[in-house]
Image: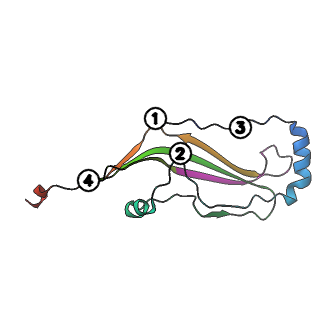
Amino acid sequence: GLQQMFGGLMVMDMSSVIEMMNEAYEQFNVSHTVNRLNFGRPIPDQVRQSLNLTSQLDGAVRSVSDGYGMFQYYLQVVPTVFRFLNGTVIETFQYGVTEHTRHVDPGSNRGLPGVFFFYEVSALHVEFEEYRRGWTHFF
């Protein structure tokens, strides 16, 4: 089954945060690199290559020239099972991503600069099964 993933909640006085952000916007750099993003067990490189699977954000570099950037990643996480002839089963997840980048001016009430990941676990799942064709295909 699916394991639950938990998030956090922070409560604070937003007026002091906004004041601080207005003063620090020019120094607040949200440029970033996503080296690797996995949900669950990593898919072995040999399997990735043979099925031509990619992780869309691995190695992604995003930069902004000022402190006014907001990067939002919306991830659709899909439970995935790999079944191999030798009996090995790997239960993991793949994901698809839509990303949005926008400029947020201080005091615009359009959000704060930062890098945000939002995810949803799909009700559908994918199964890859390795098999051998029988000899009857020669007829």
Q: Amino acid at mark 4?
A: Tyr
Disc on res. 8: 3
Q: CA distance from mark 4 to mark 1?
A: 24 Å
Q: Secondary structure at mark 2?
A: strand
Residue at the farthest left position = 139
Please name whichever residue, 74 or 9, is drawn nearer the observer in this view of the structure: 9
Of pointers 2 and 3, the one earlier in the residue sequence: 3
Q: From the top left corner, tell me how far across and down residue 95 is, in percent.
A: 51, 50
Q: Which mark is residue 1?
A: 1
Which of the two marks, 2 or 3, is nearer to us in this view?
3
Relative image position of residue 9 (x, y in whole percent): 74, 35
Residue 87 falls left or right of residue 21: left
| Residue in the image at 49% along x and 36% along y | 2
Q: Distance between the Cα atoms at labels 4 and 3?
A: 43 Å
Image mark for residue 76: 2
Q: Which residues are magenta?
A: 96-113
Q: Looking at the picture, does residue 4 appear above or below residue 95? A: above
Going from N to C along the chain, the mark reached first, 4 or 1, is 1
Q: Are marks 4 and 3 in contact (CB under 8 Å)?
A: no
